[in-house]
Amino acid sequence: MSTRAARILAGDQRTGARLMRDLDDGLPEAIEVQKALFPSTGRAFVLGVTGNPGAGKSTVVDVLIERYRRQGKRVGVVAVDPTSPFSGGAILGDRIRMQRHATDDGVFIRSLATRGHLGGLSRSTGDVALVLDAMGYDIVIIETVGVGQDEIEVVGQADTTVVVTVPGLGDEIQAIKAGILEIADVLVVNKSDREGADNSVRHLITMLELRGHDATPVEIVKTVATSHPAQGIDDLILAIERHHARGSSASDAAARKKKRARAQLGDVLHDRLRRAADAALAAHPDLVEQVASRQLDPYSAADTIARTLLKP
Amino acid sequence: MSNPRKIRILVAKPGLDGHDRGAKVVARALSDAGYEVVYTGLHQTPEMIAAAAVQESVDAVGLSIMSGAHMTLFPAVIDALKARGAGDVLVFGGGIVPDDDLAPLRAIGVAAIFKPGATTQEIVDWVEATIRPKLAS
């Protein structure tokens, strides 16, 4: 095994953080380290936290870190913020809410930018979570960007997905039912000291009931993550544990592992094919020219390029 | 092919003063220049800054210091980075620093100081001249 992989398995923060960066930048040598780490992963409990912009995801994560640390667990966090489509830059500010854990060696927080990837995560998020798993963090929390209706990629990465919403979104809560609400294993109504919290909970219950009798149960937890002490967080931890326990029968665990493996493999495969397709496209300026002058339609041009890709 | 490396910079506000406008303007300007900027907010200790710099594997740490404590805070951050094996992370800064202090700060390893009146473009130019070449290898 490479010294890099060995250091990461020993929990070395500097080496782990550098590998995360190489993975984020898509360096081929980083993939070789991942290959060496992979057999030692799969031990961490991966918790996804998603929800509307401004719902308080980072603050909820901050108090979750505190509770898990009190239980003696080591916690890794991957927090994703959007990349500006104009500048390509990003301001990664999720750490601000978690700074009291900055010097706790049992907590590792990594900020990532989406770098143009859709779905609420960066392309590298799964890889970075895997490094945290390999470093020995018991719990890996993935915090998505603020999402709307269909950024649901986190489901493929997480054992349990928590959707954070807030009172007063009214019809917008209706709007999320088609998207992120359906992926929730646990629903959180944060800032529930605000007016309309009980109304929001009733809305959510109604929508959950629409799913029919054989749907898996989803608990709704009211929290005030900014109060001292934070309210509802013990309930949230218990709801997460109950969801995890429900899925921990041997057959459920196997199904979940398979689902994760499929998502993981699919991500890598799609990424490789996308790169190959981009390269093949760059190698065929002639076809681009022909489509531009309407001599050729894009469908036939794509067929031609796809044939070169699939050639053994 | 263009370099796939993205420059990452931590912008932090150590010490007790609450004037974070400058830090926010710089964070915004660096982001507009295409860098990923980790912003950690007010009242950071050198230990917190060094830990975040390691976990975020940044190329550089930019400190905004208005309190007059620069002769204490810059060395403390540099020492904390070294203690965590991250002595290669560049430390630069801005704020109210008297001319007499510039040479001693450079001597302890502060890579650049941007005084009041410096434009954000000067900071971006410095990043391009100093950090970009390191990533090319």
Image: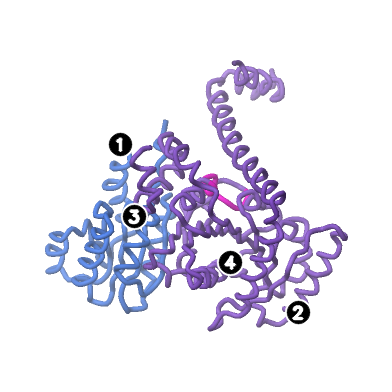
Chain colours: A purple, B blue
Up-down relation of residue A103 to residue A150 (above or below): below
Residue receiving disc 2: A198
Q: CA distance from mark 1 to mark 4?
A: 38 Å
Residue receiving disc 1: B137
Residue receiving disc 4: A57
Classify residue A200 by image quadrant: bottom right
Up-down relation of residue A27 to residue A146 (above or below): above
Residue A52 percent across, percent down from the top left: 65, 64
- In depth, the one of A69 and A154 nearer the eye is A69
- In depth, the one of A240 and A246 nearer the eye is A246
Q: Secondary structure at mark 1?
A: loop
Q: CA distance from mark 1 to mark 3?
A: 25 Å
Residue A307 percent across, percent down from the top left: 65, 18
The region drawn magenta spans A119-126
Q: Amino acid at mark 1?
A: Ser
Q: Secondary structure at mark 2?
A: helix
Q: Chain of mark 3?
A: B
Q: Residues within 10 Å of mark 3 (few under 14, many from 20)?
A: few
* Badge 3 and badge 4 both on one subunit: no
Q: Chain of mark 2?
A: A
Q: CA distance from mark 3 to mark 2?
A: 50 Å
